[in-house]
Every structure is written in C-alpha cells, then in structure tokens.
Amino acid sequence: MKWNARPMIPLSILDLAPVCEGSDTTAAFANMLQLAQHADVLGYRRYWLAEHHNMPGIASAATAVLIGHVAGGTKRIRVGAGGIMLPNHAPLQAAEQFGTLASLYPDRIDLGLGRAPGTDQPTARALRRYFDGADQFPQDVRELLHYFEPAQPGQAVQAVPGAGLRVPVWILGSSLFGARLAAALGLPYAFASHFAPDSMDEALAVYRREFRPSATLEQPHAMLALNVVASGSEAESRRLFTSQQQSFVNLRRGRPGKIPPPLADIDGFWEPHEKFGVERALACTVLGDGPQVAEGIAAFVARHQPDELMLTANIFDHQARLRSFELTMQAWHAHHAG
C-alpha cells in the first residue's frame, strides 16, 4: 500500500470518549458513535480514539474494543488508535487485536503507536507491564511490524489474524524521539501538537530530513493535531473552550475529573501561572465562527505544511460538539472552493 498526497489537506477527528459531569460512560459511548457517524457523512478522513487509563473524564481505555464498535457503526471513515500505548501491551497482542479489526473492516483500520504509558505509575503497574525506558519502544514497534508481515515457513510465533495484513502503522509523538523513529522506519508520523506543541517545528524538521523510504511510504507523511471549536461566534467558541481549559488545570492540580461545563469567565477559575501553562500547552488552537476557523486552519497549514490534520474538541454539550465539527468541515470546503 502506497501513501499519496491529496490536494486539499484532509481533516480527521481525535476522540477521547469524554465523560461529562452529570453523565456516565454509557452516554459517552453513545455520543462517540453518533459523532463518528456524523463525521463519516461530513467527509472526515479518520476517526481515532486514544488510550488513557484511570481518568474519570476519558472512557477510551479499551481502545481496540471501541474502534470495533465505531467501525461497525460507520461505512467509509477510517477508524483507528491515536494511539495504542505500546508499553502497556505485548506487541503480539496488539498485532492480533488490530489484525482482527482489519479482517473485520478491511482497509479502514489505522494503528497509531505511542511510547508513553498514558497514565500514572501506580496504574501502569496495575496494567502488569513495566516500562523500562525509551530504548524498548523501537524494539517493540519492530516486533509488531514483523507480525504484520506474511508468515514464513517455520515461523515460531504468528499473529492470527494479523500476518500478511500490513495494517497501516503510525508513530505518535510529542518530542524528537518519535520523529526520529518514524523517519528511520519509513512510517507516517503524527505529532501531539494539540497539547504539547513546544517541539513541533523541530520534530517535523527532523522527521522530514531523516526520513528513509520504506515498502509502505516513499515520502514523509506528517499529521498534526489541532484544537478547533466552531460555533456561531468567536465569543461562544471561547466560552465552549473553557471546558477543555478547566480540564487541563484540574489535571495539573492533581484532581482529574469529568469534563466540566463551560464558564462565562474563566479568569476567576485559574491562577496566573496556571493560565500561562495551559495557554502554552493549548497554543495550537483555533476558535471562532465558520470563516474564522477556516482561516485559522489555513494559516496553521500554511505555516507548518502538514499532510493531514487531526482535530479535537472536548466540548461539554454534545450537540454543540456535533455542530462544531459540522461547521468546521463546511467552512473548510468553502475556503477551498473560494
């Protein structure tokens, strides 16, 4: 399978199956599927779910299970992991899970791999996997890739299903480590600019400069993540975005919880140093009405030249979230048509 560039930068969605205050995981999963179906109709390219553990506001811990649920409830959109935190999994098990998904939903499954545990140390220990450091991650990735190759005569361990399926594998990252690994292996690279943008430009430069063509990818292919909230006005979008800002502050205060409702005035919620930290972490954010969002996305694309964009928005009100992704896609198409 060869990767090809497209004239208009494709838009995709990263979801965490957010659990809002006053709600539960059952509602979160229903909202997740509805958003994925909405994205499918609107023309989003991918719908990715991220693995997190021990987080009351994030219900996507059993990532592969949810990917199967979403793929089964949609028709066209690619569904995948953004990502699977490989330190928590044996490479063989990950290959089997995604080989199963790819067999059920051919040419629609993506596997993004991250090297962080996606949780705190007590939870990592509870997962029964022990992360010894960054040096093990490249070895695990290579092992996993091997399981997707056609099985050889006498091969002692095979992924069944998985062998010969060549499930598209992405390397995720927020530092130069992932950029160098993706380049060395000739894999597509997705950078977590939606919450860790500090190394974005340097990581992209390293990935593009050091990239080595592979059997699946002839040229570097980079995807950047962007927080986007669209509504009828910039003021309303800024209000909706305060839910995500509060969640970041609560996490840094050591009190992660469910997604809170938006605030009319967030300055009364955080301390100046908290505001500075959150605004730096969420610097890759576009807010506004449809045209403002399209212009903001276009400016981001012009500056960083990604091959794809992955959008995310933890909006408290589900209908407002659906509308945000709808307005964004409509405005993006209008921007290119104009």
Image (cartoon, rainbow, N blue to C red):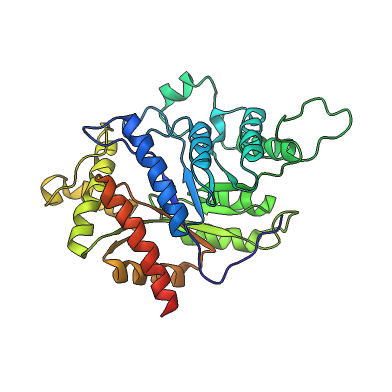
In the image, is residue 239 above or below residue 79?
A: below
Residue at left 36%, top 62%?
Answer: 328
* Whole-percent x, y for residue 256 in the image: 28, 33
The picture places residue 111, in percent across and down from the top left corner, at: 58, 43
Q: Quadrant of the C terminus?
A: bottom left
Q: Is residue 112 visible?
A: yes
Residue found at x 70% / y 35%? 162
Res. 277 in view = no
Q: Viewer-proximal residue, 8 or 180?
A: 8
Residue in the image at 65% along x and 52% along y: 187
Q: Is 79 left or right of 259, judged from the image as shown?
A: right
Nearer to the camera, 332 or 136: 332
121 to 245, vertically: above or below: above
On the image, which quarter does residue 96 sit in?
top right
Residue lying farthest bottom?
338
Q: Position of residue 277 (x, y in %)?
A: 28, 49
Quarter of the rendering occupied by the N terminus: bottom right
- The relative height of residue 163 versus residue 325 in the rendered view (above or below) is above
Q: Residue at x 41, y 44 (%)?
A: 15
Would residue 275 appear left or right of 306 to someone viewing this image? left
Measured from the top left, where is residue 226 in percent x and y? Answer: 40, 57
- Quadrant in which residue 87 is drawn: top right
